Image: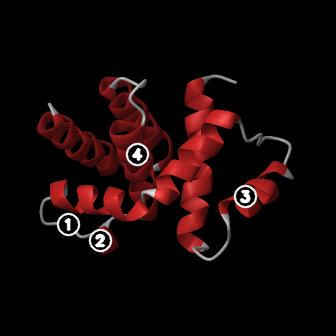
């Protein structure tokens, strides 16, 4: 399994967690792994764990760069993708920021509404420029 696929699996768990905030992520992984197409990996588990651990900081960062958009106005898919990508940008020094942004945009093209990919790209680009 490559990193893109591992990110996609992390996204699926983070998306599911939005609807089941009281369910531990390990339980969400276990339920997902009951299907034949899902296999949690070390990287996907670490990405989910850090995203959940730093959730408040990540959400604050998203809100700061989502001009005129609160978290409540974002689609759940876009929110899960943004959380995942912002986590990578802030807490995974070994992953280039450009890779995190590109992967997030690709996930958005696959799962989100058409307008979400450009929104996600803009928010993440703003975060990246502010961190330079």
Query: What residue is rendered at 41% in x and 52% in y?
Result: 83
Q: Earlier in the sequence, mark 1 or mark 4?
A: 1
Residue 131 point in image, percent of width and height = 17, 37
Secondary element at image label 1: loop
Q: Earlier in the sequence, mark 2 or mark 4?
A: 2
Left or right placement of residue 57 versus residue 5 in this view:
left
The picture quadrant where one finds residue 79 is bottom left
Q: Earlier in the sequence, mark 2 or mark 3?
A: 3
The picture quadrant where one finds residue 65 is bottom left
The picture quadrant where one finds residue 43 is top right
Q: Which residue is mark 4?
A: 87
Does any portion of residue 9 appear in the rendered image?
no
The local crowd at label 3, few if under 14, some if 14 to 19, many if 20 or more residues have their Cα within 10 Å, is some
Report the disc number at residue 69.
1
The answer to whether the residue labelled 1 contacts the one labelled 4, judged by CB atoms less than 8 Å apart, is no
Left or right placement of residue 80 versus residue 101 in this view:
right
- Disc 2 versus disc 4: nearer the observer: 4
Q: Which residue is mark 3?
A: 26
- Disc 3 versus disc 1: nearer the observer: 3
The local crowd at label 2, few if under 14, some if 14 to 19, many if 20 or more residues have their Cα within 10 Å, is few
């Amino acid at each position: 399994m490559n990193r893109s696929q591992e990110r996609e699996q992390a996204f699926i768990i983070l998306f599911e967690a939005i609807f089941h905030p009281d369910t531990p992520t390990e339980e969400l992984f276990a339920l997902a792994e009951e299907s034949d197409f899902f296999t949690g990996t070390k990287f996907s588990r670490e990405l989910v764990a850090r995203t959940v651990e730093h959730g408040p900081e990540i959400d604050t960062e998203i809100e700061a760069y989502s001009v005129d958009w609160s978290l409540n106005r974002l689609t759940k898919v876009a929110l899960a993708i943004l959380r995942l990508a912002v986590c990578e940008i802030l807490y995974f020094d070994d992953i280039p920021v450009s890779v995190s942004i590109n992967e997030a945009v690709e996930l958005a093209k696959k799962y989100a509404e058409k307008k979400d990919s450009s929104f996600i790209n803009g928010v993440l680009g703003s975060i990246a420029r502010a961190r330079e």
